[in-house]
Amino acid sequence: MHGKRRPIPKLPTQIAGLDEILEGGLPRGRTSLVSGGPGSGKTVLSLEFLCRGAMAGDPGVFVTFEERAEAVRMNALSMGWNLAALEKAGKMAIIEARLSGDEVLSGDFDIQGLLTIVGGHARRIRARRVVMDALDVLLRVYGDRQRERIELYRLHDWLIDRKLTSVLSVKAQLDGNMAHRYEFLDFMADCVIRLDHRVLGQVATRRLRVIKYRGSGFGTNEYPYVIGDHGIVLFPLTQTQLTHQPLGKKVSSGLAGLDAMLDGGFRRAACILIAGSSGTGKTTLASAFARAASRRHEKVLYLSFEESQEAMIAGMLSAGIDLRPALRTQRLMVQTALPEAMGSDNHLIRALEAMDSFKPDHLILDAISACVRMGSEHAAFDYLMRLVAVVKERGITCILTNQMTGLAGDGEELSGIGFSSVVDAVIQLRFVDAGQEIGRQILIIKSRGSGHSNRRESFYITDQGIEFPNNLRLPSARAGQADPKDGGK
């Protein structure tokens, strides 16, 4: 007979995104191993696990074999963690067990003395968490692999006997693999996490991977992460089920003619792609939406990779779209950055932090084509997939623009990076040869969950904004609010 499945108890790390990957946290009362090369964030992850637990009332002991205790405290302050205050409150103890490098092993030296000190501090503050940072520094003292294993298994048994949830960090080679002499650590630990700091396309990036987790499921992919102002932030896409919000009611695009083509406007919480070659009016359409939203007292976050805020605002004035009132009333927030200034992970955390603080109803990203300069087409795709996943989960309407090559732009994949299938509405803008002049046309390729026009319509960008010469109007009295009795086109 099969017994009832009983999941192992876990201790949340409270590190953004990590508990989702670990399906709840680290194994409670067991040993976890964190390895990685220089700059990968081993100490930061281990220390954050301890700090967040201490701040939540779960004391811990931090043992450092490489850095001075004062340096650990100063580094933690840069992320807002006041270790001295936690120590004073009896929620944390820091043990400096640094080795100078000229130690001489004699007799039957073992780690029992260190364990006695750690045990004393753990009892004093009633700690249930222990971190031993740069444990490989201690192991090298023995100079004998057999002795290393003996002492390490003694440490492991000591931690398990006291039911301490422990994190051991060790260095890895530059290729991300554990040094061969410490491979046995992978077999000893119940949970093994590998951190990797790599450079791709001249852009630095970090990735986390869980190698194993005894008695538990876990996310098996590589996950991007950044070391931010408040610790480590991961961006997992581990859900087996989509948790996107359903599309909402219609909201005006800000243009009566476009609303008519869309049978009332965009669906709230939809992802809209506006694609076209340079000069066709992508930014103008997006800015018209931002102006209309601000007039409805809704907030818009505008991510610009093409122009500075001042250049974008000034450029829209020539098309009759004044976004200055929206900025003054703080209904519009413009975040600008050069795509190559940082990796896609850092761009993503900047956007997420802006969403958390500003709490927008809508988001505009101008433009997808610039995102490739974050390092590669894959980096751009990764960035956009995660960004769109977040805005959809939060019910935020998202408008993406993309610059296509050529006048007409026909025959191209509309997003440029294989991204079109995940968007809810696609609008194509193009130039047309009208004899002695070049005209502009707009076409609704698709509008998920809504009827829409299947005709190409001409439009003009004038000093008073975008105008549709065919005088398109909605069947309802008010632009942007479709009559619920009216059917799709």
Image: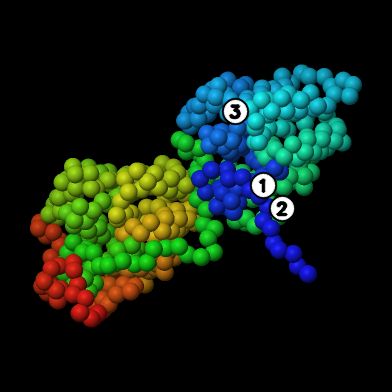
Label 3 Cα crowd, 10 Å radius (few <14 / some 14-19 / many 20+): many
Disc 1: which residue:
27
- Residue 214, which numbered label? 2
* Residue 325 in the figure: left or right of residue 114: left
For the C terminus, which image quadrant? Answer: bottom left
Q: Residue at x 65, y 31 (%)?
A: 126
As shown in the figure, which amino acid type bears the numbered disc 1? Pro
Determine contact: label 2, label 1, CB under 8 Å: yes
Q: Is residue 107 visible?
A: yes
* Residue 422 in the figure: left or right of residue 404: right
Q: Quadrant of residue 471?
A: bottom left
As shown in the figure, which amino acid type bears the numbered disc 3? Met
- Residue 241, which numbered label? none
Closer to the N terminus: mark 3 or mark 2? 3
Determine contact: label 3, label 2, CB under 8 Å: no
Decide which of 336, 477 is in the foreground and name it: 477
Decide which of 274, 239 is in the foreground and name it: 239
Decide which of 160, 329 is in the foreground and name it: 160
Label 1 Cα crowd, 10 Å radius (few <14 / some 14-19 / many 20+): many
Determine contact: label 3, label 1, CB under 8 Å: no
* Residue 343 image point, x, y percent: 46, 45
Q: Residue at x 42, y 69 (%)?
A: 421
* Residue 97 image point, x, y percent: 70, 23
Q: Residue at x 14, y 76 (%)?
A: 475
* Residue 321 image point, x, y percent: 15, 53
* Residue 222 sits above or below residue 476 on the image: above
The answer for how far apart the CA atoms under marks 3 and 2 are is 28 Å
Say what secondary structure mark 2 lies in. Answer: loop
Disc 3: which residue:
92
Closer to the N terminus: mark 2 or mark 1? 1
* Residue 223 in the figure: left or right of residue 187: left
